[in-house]
Each structure stands twice: as structure tokens, then as C-alpha cells.
Image (cartoon, rainbow, N blue to C red):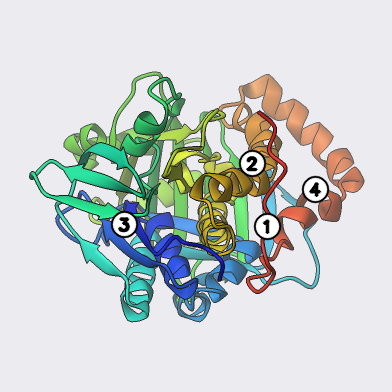
Amino acid sequence: MSTTTRSAIIIGGGISGPVTATALHRAGIDATVFEAYPGPAYGIGANLALAPNGVAALDLVGAGDPVRAKAAPLSRSTMSVNSKQFPLPGLVDIEPLRVIDRSDLHEILHDTAVAAGVRFEYDKRLVEVEEHAGGVTAIFADGSSATADVLIGADGIRSTVRTLVDPNAPGPTYLRMLGFGAYTDAPLDLEPETMTFAFGKRAYYLYWAMPDGRVAWGANLPTEQYYSLTEARAVSTEQWLRTLRETYADDLPGRQLAEATTTAQLQVIGALHVMPRVPHWHRGRMALTGDAIHAPSNTSGQGASLAIESGIELARCLRDIDDPAMAFATYEALRRPRVEAVAARVARMNQTKAAGPVARMAMQLMMPIMFKRMNPEKMLGGEQRFRIDWDATVRPAAVHA
């Protein structure tokens, strides 16, 4: 290891924070995670998908097999328009998609990091960063501070570190949809290991059979009104269920899924976002990773996987490149083309989630032609077959001013 970087402060204990810290420890760099919540965020959010590339990246930090043990495998997918099913072409000879509760993933990543020697400190809300010769100091709302060689912002779409790197940085873009999820006991006869993306008459939803016999589903409810997670959860689940049942009343099996869902089962996620292009990923001894710089739409199926990859690639760059500024520039050169290509692929798909009657009919007519011409290897092969070579030495990128 040629680097002089020996210590790192990680801001954020969700997905990318623990992964980055664990990868840094593997690279010989001491890392401590500082989280604003009072403890591990095991109860935050519903489920999420991990693509094969994301699970392969988790293998590098020792979390791949625990995720496989907890997650539901999904090896096939279909699209439903006006309740008519269209099988989607997929990749062959590749690990299935893995769907896991966000809380389970958080717990696995936290426990893996702790086992690797990562320290976590809670109730630490970042308010200021001071850079100085040879290091950086994080100052927290409780008056405490921490100093290290570098600071990594893994603090999500509302990243404080992003505004410290660039006060003019863009914030997340609201997709004009609210997210909901649930596991239900709906009596549906569904194909195993198959996810269905359904375009209902009023809203988009998706569903799949769980190995234990339950049915998992997620809803994207179109609305111009913005609800943060706190605001959405301030509305009673009874009221949200009434809205969902009205929205999916004319859809099959949307109606059955909404009717079978109980208030105890419903997970309220709140506003759905994407991150627009972030001009500056780093400044001085600070850098960003995960959703703080690239949060593609949930339609991509790559959000968490890209965050995991970026944390590991950032650790490799700091391991192999002596100067932190050059390490960060090389990291950006490695990652930006990949994450922006994924964002571009799914940008148009979000516009179809609230398709009206005419658009849905056109989709239904065009689907057979589109799928016949679709080349899944060309569309998804580069995304899902991507693998990080941990042992390869990272060479400084040729960075142009």
C-alpha cells in the first residue's frame, strides 16, 4: 500500500457508509462511521433490490453470503399493461436479483463492519468541517469533534457533506410519486421467483411471490403534493390504504393486493427522488459516495448496488494513490461514466409510470415488437456483469482541469 492515508471519517451509517468503512479497513485504513440517528437504522424503509453486480461487490467485504441467506431470489420478470402479461427478456448465466428488507440489509452491513473492526458513533449530526494541514476535522451538533486524514460523505440524498463540498450543489429531484410497500397474504397464484412490473389504470405498482407464501408489492402513487418521510407517516395508514384501494380498484391484481394489505403491513416510504448530475464529487480532503452523488430511480434496480460499488472503489483509490485529492479525482473518473449511464437508461422509464389510457394502449400494442427486438445483453449486460477486481492496482487517472 503506497498511500499515506491512515484514517477516515465516514458520515452516514445507511448502506454506503458501512460498506465504505469496511472496504477501507480491508485496505488498511482506519475508519469510523458517524451517524445522526440515535442507533442503527434497522427500521427505516421497505425492501430494495440488489443486482448481481451489487451482491458480487458485497462479497468483497464479506457481506454477500449473509445477504443471499436473507434475500428472496428473483430470476425472471414480466411487464403487465392493462392486466396483460409480457415476459421480459433477461440475461442468462447470471445470479438472480436479490430482494431484501432494507432493515435486514442495514443490520448485515452494520454487523459485517463491526466484525471487521469499524467503530460506529451515534447521535452525531454533522454541522461543520474544518480542513487543515494534513487532515480534516468534523464538528457535530453536540459540540464534539473528530479528526482524520479524509472525510467521506455517505449521508444520502439530503447530504450535508455535499453542501460543504459545493454550496451550489443540486439537491434531489422529486419524482411526483410517493412510495409504499407491504407483504400481504393475498390469495394469488403467482410464478415463483418472478417480479411483475404493472402499469395500472391510475398508477404503477410491482409485485412478486415470497418464498414463505406471502406476496410482496410496492406502489408508486402519483401526486404533486410533496410528503417527506415524516410528513407521510404523520398521515394515518388507514387513510393511505383507502387511497391505495381507490387508486388500484380497477386493476388486477392491484385491487386484491390493496384490499389484502392491513394497516400493520403497510410501509409508508414517502416522496421518491432521484439525484440530478452532481458537478463536484470532492473537494480537498472531502469526497462523496452513494446516494449523496448518485441516486437513480428505483426503476433502475441499481441504486443500492451502485452505492456499494462506489464505496469499494473509493477505498481502492485511497489504498493505492498517495495524494487524497488525486485519489478522489481518480475515483470520480472511474465511477461517473458508469452511474450516469444507468441514470440515463432509466430516465425515460419514469415518465411511463403514470401513463394515461391512450399511452397504456400504445404500450400494450408495442410491447411484443419491442421485446422481440430487445437485446438484454446489450441493455443490461454491462451493468449486471460488472465486477470489481479488488487486487488490481488503481492507477491515477489523467484528470483535466
The vertical placement of 13 against 169, above or below, is: below
Q: Residues within 10 Å of mark 2 (few under 14, many from 20)?
A: some
Comes first in the chain, label 1 or label 4: 1
Which numbered disc, 1 or 4, marks the residue closer to the eye?
A: 4
Which numbered disc, 2 or 4, marks the residue closer to the eye?
A: 2
CB atoms of marks 2 and 4 within 8 Å: no
> Residue under circle 4?
379
> Residue under circle 1?
77
Which numbered disc, 3 or 4, marks the residue closer to the eye?
A: 3
The circle drawn on residue 336 is 2
**Amino acid of disc 1:** Ser
Which numbered disc, 3 or 2, marks the residue closer to the eye?
A: 2
Q: Residues within 10 Å of mark 1 (few under 14, many from 20)?
A: some
Comes first in the chain, label 3 or label 2: 3
User: Residue 352 placed where, x, y %?
Assistant: 63, 29
Label 1 – label 4 distance at C-alpha: 15 Å
> Residue under circle 3?
13
